[in-house]
Amino acid sequence: MADAARWKATVFVGGLSQTVTSSHVLDAFIPFGEIVDVQLPKSTARDSTDSHRGFAYVEFEQSADAEEAIDNMDQSEFFGRILKVSQAKAPKSADEGLGSKKAIWEQEGWLAEHAGDQTGGLPAGQDRLIEDAVPDPMQGLEGLDVAGPKPA
């Protein structure tokens, strides 16, 4: 299955109790269609070695089954907790956006979007207008060879 189609057929299930296992999630979502995979991401805390993070991803065979699961299971009670069931979002690439290890201007789409005119960024003739509008702060100091006030 293509990656985009795969994420369309995947639902995010949030608000899970710590007592819930992947087989519980599978049993709860199997009425809506053929399930390919159930993932309960493990907690990264050092003290809890076997606990999950309180959410799961359920991947269905077809995206219509995922929509049916969202319609029926969102805001339902499961092990004493209210579930938040929604369409899963594809993870961001590690090479794009904030937190990437690549400079933003080196990313593929950024340069095409933000690269102005290659002649300096200003339309023709406008650079001359800017030079005329701002007086040169060094003008009139050509004859001075010593710093400080002029002798009287």
Image (cartoon, rainbow, N blue to C red):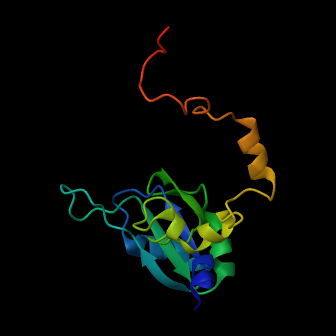
Residue 33: x %, y % from top left? 60, 83
* Furthest-bottom residue in this view: 1
* Furthest-top residue in this view: 152
Q: Residue at x 45, y 67 (%)?
A: 56
Total numbered labels? 0
Q: Nearer the viewer, residue 62 or 99?
A: 99
User: Quadrant location of residue 110?
Assistant: bottom right
Q: Residue at x 74, y 56 (%)?
A: 122
Residue 140: x %, y % from top left? 61, 29
Q: Is residue 25 above or below residue 131?
A: below
Q: Is residue 93 above or below residue 19?
A: below
Q: Quadrant of the N terminus?
A: bottom right
User: Quadrant location of residue 130?
Assistant: top right
Residue 96: x %, y % from top left? 50, 68
Q: Nearer the viewer, residue 87 or 19?
A: 87
Q: Is residue 18 above or below residue 61?
A: above
* Furthest-left residue in this view: 47
Q: Residue at x 56, y 84 (%)?
A: 3
Q: Residue at x 46, y 82 (%)?
A: 37
Residue 80: x %, y % from top left? 45, 52
Observer able to see residue 100:
yes
